[in-house]
Image (cartoon, coloured by chain):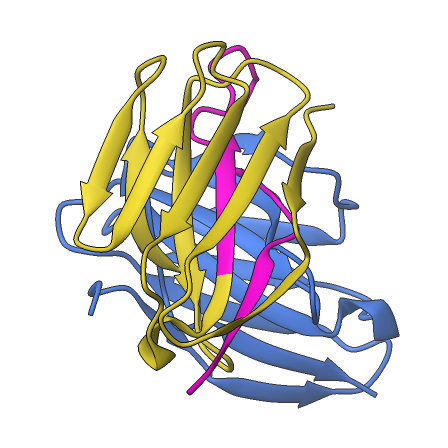
Amino acid sequence: GQQVMQIPQYQHVQEGEDFTTYCNSSTTLSNIQWYKQRPGGHPVFLIQLVKSGEVKKQKRLTFQFGEAKKNSSLHITATQTTDVGTYFCAGSNAGGTSYGKLTFGQGTILTVHP
Amino acid sequence: ETGVTQSPTHLIKTRGQQVTLRCSSQSGHNTVSWYQQALGQGPQFIFQYYREEENGRGNFPPRFSGLQFPNYSSELNVNALELDDSALYLCASSLAGILQYFGPGTRLTVT
């Protein structure tokens, strides 16, 4: 079945440093979604990427979808303590039997030292 | 806030018991997906309900079952609870599976 791998598992940064997490799917995706989960919380939707090569920005966050629609990345510029949490990518495979079924990566836990 | 609610917030059950978790979807959404998130892991897809019918199932045994009601709210039922069923159970509301918004989850502990 479809697998989504995410690296790194952990990332510790000093406040102000940049952060990137990478996501790779074993199959071509119809779209990819990114979520943030704070400790003790639930996944909060950040963005959806649909088009090959798509790049979207949300303030300090930049999201990219690969040309082959099998990989994606999230880059945060000048991290802040409010960025702390686990970032998940979740892929959806249009060829699957479940419309909108999301396959999540393992997540990247980001800690930011002030 | 997404408008997706789940109840109860926390639950403690004994191995072998049965449990029912509930989810109210966001207004205008007709699809509810259920996920299990074990500690330190990403959410795993259990199944999805679209217009009151199951619309896909993940790798979970039949003792995991569900329902969706005419108002698109949903229930997740788990029979014969096992220790490994201890997890955060999340429902996600969407319009036909697109842009899924998660509820706060139900933390289930099986002892």
Q: Nearer the viewer, residue B56 or A78?
A: A78
Indicate the chain coloured yellow by its letter.
A
Residue A18 left/right relative to B65? left
Q: Looking at the picture, does residue A14 appear above or below residue A75? A: below
Q: Looking at the picture, does residue B89 appear above or below residue B10? A: above
At which x and y percent is residue B108?
64, 79
* Residue A93 sits inside the magenta stretch: yes
Q: Looking at the picture, does residue B97 appear above or below residue A20? A: above
Q: Residue furthest left?
A: B28
Q: Nearer the viewer, residue A4 or B99?
A: A4
The part of the chain drawn in magenta is A87-114
Q: Quadrant of residue B20?
A: bottom right
Q: Nearer the viewer, residue A100 or A11?
A: A11
* Residue B54 sits inside the magenta stretch: no
Total numbered labels: 0
The residue sitting at 40% across, 76% down in the picture is: A15
At which x and y percent is residue A29?
50, 18
At which x and y percent is residue B47?
56, 41
Indicate the chain coloured blue by its letter.
B
Quadrant where the N terminus of chain B lies? bottom left
The residue sitting at 70% across, 30% down in the picture is: A3
The residue sitting at 60% across, 87% down in the picture is: B11
The residue sitting at 44% across, 58% down in the picture is: B91
Q: Nearer the viewer, residue A61 or B96?
A: A61
